[in-house]
Amino acid sequence: MNLKSLGLRTDLIFPKYHGEIHDRGSYIVVKTSTNPDFFWGNLLIFETPPGANVRAAWERLFAEEFKGSGSQHKTFAWDCEEIGEVKQFEEAGYRFERSLVLRATAEQIVPPAHLSVNLRIRPVEGTDWESVIRVQSSTNPQYGSFYANQAQSYQKLIRAGMGQWFGAFLGEHLVGSLGLFRENEIGRFQLVTTDPAFQRQGICGTLVYRVSQHALSEMGLDELVMVADENYHAARIYESVGFKVVEKMYGVCHSGPLL
């Protein structure tokens, strides 16, 4: 099964290194063994959107593929921009996820309207990671352990030369961060986060702009990819520095246990 979606293809940069990917022909199994609670790192990807009455069949497949994995959820995505019959999942308590995939090249990147001149941006190192996890957790306190587990996985990717994590600092205080990882000439951003106490100060836009400049001029990347919630304001920030929406991604997730 050859994925068409740019968003899904770049999603798989990460499980290729610290997880498993199995092509079953009609669907793909993605497992992130280092973080079984990662909803969108442990999922099934289908070629077509859900048709009528497929929920039970998809759930059985998920239970078979993830038996003994430690995952306590069910997540499904599909490789097309059709929504399909999602009502059957919503009625069973699933959350329907709508994401925008944004792309930028060197010719597109522009400075944001509110460029923070006081912001210092550099790769994070050592104890900086504690601040990265703290800021991430401050936006979603219930996911603190998830962010800690992901930080360990990202550091392994950095040591393998696959990317870098950048922090935005005001003085010595980390107020935002993001990751940028690569596969060949494509770069994929991860977990763009701003400290809630420092929002609406141009930090996110400045951070994305400066890192994008660095990536396209110094890291040998030709294009950069972002994925953002369709209903979240972050997509507008990315568009303000030149990213353009190129596709939509859909999926459903249930946080309850397997069958």
Image: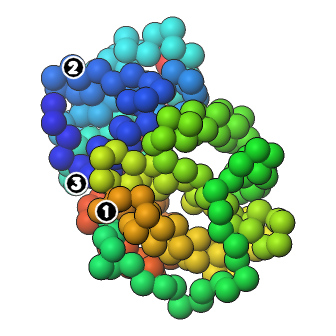
Query: Which colouring convention does the figure follow?
Result: rainbow
Q: Residue at x 33, y 69 (%)?
A: 104
Q: Position of residue 120 (x, y in %)?
A: 70, 73
The residue identified by callout 2 is 24
Question: Can see residue 163?
Answer: yes
Q: Secondary structure at mark 2?
A: loop
The alpha-carbon separation of the residues under discs 1 and 3 comes to: 21 Å
Q: Position of residue 82 (x, y in %)?
A: 21, 52
In this rendering, position of residue 164 left or right of residue 141: left
The residue identified by callout 1 is 223
The amino acid type of the residue labelled 2 equals Arg
The amino acid type of the residue labelled 1 equals Glu
Identify the mark nearer the N-term, 1 or 2. 2
Q: Position of residue 149 (x, y in %)?
A: 65, 33
Q: Position of residue 162 (x, y in %)?
A: 45, 42
On screen, 256 above or below 214? above
Q: Secondary structure at mark 1?
A: strand
Pick the residue in front: 140 or 131: 131
The amino acid type of the residue labelled 3 equals Glu
Q: Residues within 10 Å of mark 1 (few under 14, many from 20)?
A: some
Report which quarter residue 226 is drawn in.
Answer: bottom left
Q: Is there CB contact under 8 Å for labels 1 and 2?
A: no
